[in-house]
Image: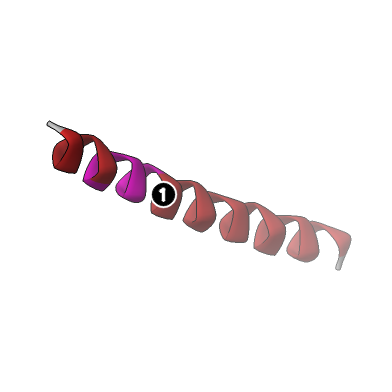
Amino acid sequence: MRVEKYSRNKNEWRFIAINRTRLSEIREQKSI
């Protein structure tokens, strides 16, 4: 169970990082 939770958290963090980069890109496009 520990491994499953760890891998799940890893995927969530990766998803959050991707969303943050997308948000920053969208903000840059809006500013331009």
Residue 5 falls within the magenta-colored stretch: no
Magenta portion: prevailing SS class: helix
2 up-or-down from 7: above or below? above
Quarter of the image for the N terminus: give it: top left
Q: Residue sitting at 60 percent across and 52 percent down?
A: 20
Q: Choose between 9 and 25: the one closer to the eye.
A: 9
Estimate how packed mark 1 is, as few (under 14), some (14 to 19) or many (20 or more) residues with alpha carbons within 10 Å: few
Q: How is the image coloured?
A: secondary structure
Image location of residue 16, percent across then percent down: 49, 46
Q: Choose between 3 and 25: the one closer to the eye.
A: 3
Q: Residue sitting at 86 percent across and 68 percent down?
A: 32
- Kind of element beneath mark 1: helix
Instruction: Give the quadrant of residue 24.
Output: bottom right
7 up-or-down from 26: above or below? above
Image location of residue 27, percent across then percent down: 76, 56
Q: Residue sitting at 27 percent across and 43 percent down?
A: 6
Q: From this viewpoint, which residue is outermost toward the bottom?
A: 32
Q: Which region is colored magenta?
A: 7-12
Q: Choose between 6 and 8: the one closer to the eye.
A: 6
Q: Amino acid at mark 1?
A: Phe
Q: Which residue is under mark 1?
A: 15
